[in-house]
Image (cartoon, rainbow, N blue to C red):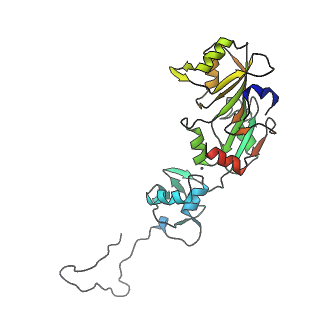
Amino acid sequence: MQKISDMSRSDNSSGKKFSGRQGGSSRKKSYARGNAPIKRKNTALEKREDGMRLNKYIANAGICSRRDADIYIASGNVSVNGEVVTEMGYKVQLTDEVKFDGRSITPDKPEYFVLNKSKGVFVTGSVHKGGLTVMDIMAKASKSKLDPIGKLDTQTTGLLVFTNDGALAKKLANPKNGIRQIYHIKLDHALSQDDLEKIREGVYIESKKINVTDVSYVKDRPKTEVGMELTSTKPHIVQKIFKSLSYEILNLDRVVYGGLTKKDLPRGRFRTLTKQEVINLGNL
């Protein structure tokens, strides 16, 4: 486990059936050849022999496992080309429009990356023409549409996870789950011992108490440099904590996210997560 006091040492998802008596007659109804009733064909739900099984399509989209996908399909949560499908084993084509709970999904293979974001790089888009965004960087990683989990301010640096796995992204972004994060913070003036203790005890932001896991001075560095560990995913929460105590953050760097660290990942670079790292994130 990385100690926050040692951070300076590392930059580091109908037809009706007829049976029995009808009109008092038990005779079976028969039709002359060519006079049989025409059964309307639902072109959207026509069973096909080729294509990808719907449950696999959903699983590949990162929504859930195939077994859970069957449950959702049977419950009517899935539609293909505008028609609800509840048939097990139904196959879809890549050209079909598949929606899960009304949201379009694609069967891309789940991919996972982590980026060591540089300062001045936009996350959600640039207000300045030509400004570099994290999406510009991650376009080199995959042809799939990758989305960042959470956000970092333009001037904030450090770890940012990207994936096309909607289920994992939703889980990690849920404030109730609490993802472990460690920040290396540089302040405009030295943090007093009294204010350090106030942060440890929990400060009130917008009438709500914000508890941190730990906060301390960075070892062998000026008292303007602080390490903070917390699990809150509230926007700008670190900045708000110090602003409430009249400090301005000059540099904010996320050095740990979940079980991920910046070790061997230079600023501005990204890498693919290992299988074990993905499992670990899923278990958080």
Residue 21 lies, in percent from the top left, at 22, 80
Looking at the image, which is closer to me, 232 or 103? 232
Looking at the image, which is closer to me, 265 or 60? 265
Asked whether, in this view, residue 85 is left or right of residue 195, the answer is: left
Which quadrant would the N terminus be assigned to in this image? top right
In this view of the protein, can residue 81 be seen by the observer?
no
Looking at the image, which is closer to me, 129 or 196? 196
In this view of the protein, can residue 181 be seen by the observer?
yes
Rendered view: 263 above or below 106: above
| Residue at 62% across, 49% down | 165
Asked whether, in this view, residue 86 is left or right of residue 266, the answer is: left
Rendered view: 116 above or below 8: below
| Residue at 38% across, 76% down | 38
Residue 213's quadrant in the figure? top right
Asked whether, in this view, residue 247 is left or right of residue 218, the answer is: left
Rendered view: 240 above or below 178: above
Rendered view: 174 above or below 78: above
Asked whether, in this view, residue 273 is left or right of residue 45, the answer is: right
Q: Residue furthest left?
A: 24
- Total numbered circles: 0
Residue 45 lies, in percent from the top left, at 48, 66
Residue 8 lies, in percent from the top left, at 80, 26
Which quadrant would the C terminus be assigned to in this image? top right
Residue 34 lies, in percent from the top left, at 38, 85
